[in-house]
Image (spheres, helix red, strand yellow):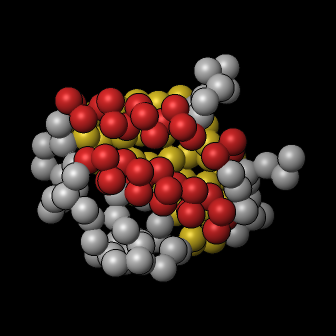
Amino acid sequence: MAKRRSIEIPGLQHENPIPAACQIGPFLVSGGIFGKDPATGTIPPDIETQCALMFSNIRLILTAAGGTSEDIIKLTIWLKDKADRPHVNREWLAMFPDEHSRPARHSFTLPDLPGNARVQCEIMAILTSD
């Protein structure tokens, strides 16, 4: 039986005792991933930088788990303001440029994201050795 492994990223710790992601065998599921700067531990005020950092943090988590963006099967996004969706889409298209090879995605509006966070996501991935 595969053992559960917590994935931790320096600078991306949660306030509560929750890992950045959890892996069992090839399956990886993240906790909330914010547009937090791992070097400073802060979330910048602008949505453009938050989106860029959020997608960068996705890559950090995947790398720590031994995967890549090609392993993502689902991305769930929460936006404080639905009008910010174009900023998410810009980073989405940069990470997944092939329209025939993109993960599933679902977006929600969540006006009470913590602090100055304007976007948050979670990923599900199946890590492959290809």
Give the x, y percent position of residue 43.
Answer: 27, 65
| The residue positioned farthest toward the right in the image shown | 130
Residue nearest the observer in this picture, 34 or 87: 87
Q: Note whether 44 is above or below 40 in the view shown.
A: above
Q: Note whether 126 is above or below 105 in the view shown.
A: below
Q: In the displayed structure, does residue 110 sit left or right of residue 48?
A: left
| The residue positioned farthest toward the top in the image shown | 100
Give the x, y percent position of residue 91.
Answer: 46, 40
Residue at screen point 65% across, 26% down: 98
Residue at screen point 72% across, 62% down: 66
Q: Quadrant of residue 62?
A: bottom right
Q: Quadrant of the N terminus?
A: bottom right
Residue 16 seen in this snapshot: no
Q: In the displayed structure, does residue 122 sit left or right of residue 34?
A: right
Q: How many marks?
A: 0
Q: Note whether 69 is above or below 44 in the view shown.
A: above
Residue nearest the observer in this picture, 112 or 60: 60
Residue 121 seen in this snapshot: yes
Give the x, y percent position of residue 30.
Answer: 49, 56
Q: Note whether 60 is above or below 123 in the view shown.
A: below
Give the x, y percent position of residue 130.
Answer: 86, 47
Residue nearest the observer in this picture, 72 or 92: 92
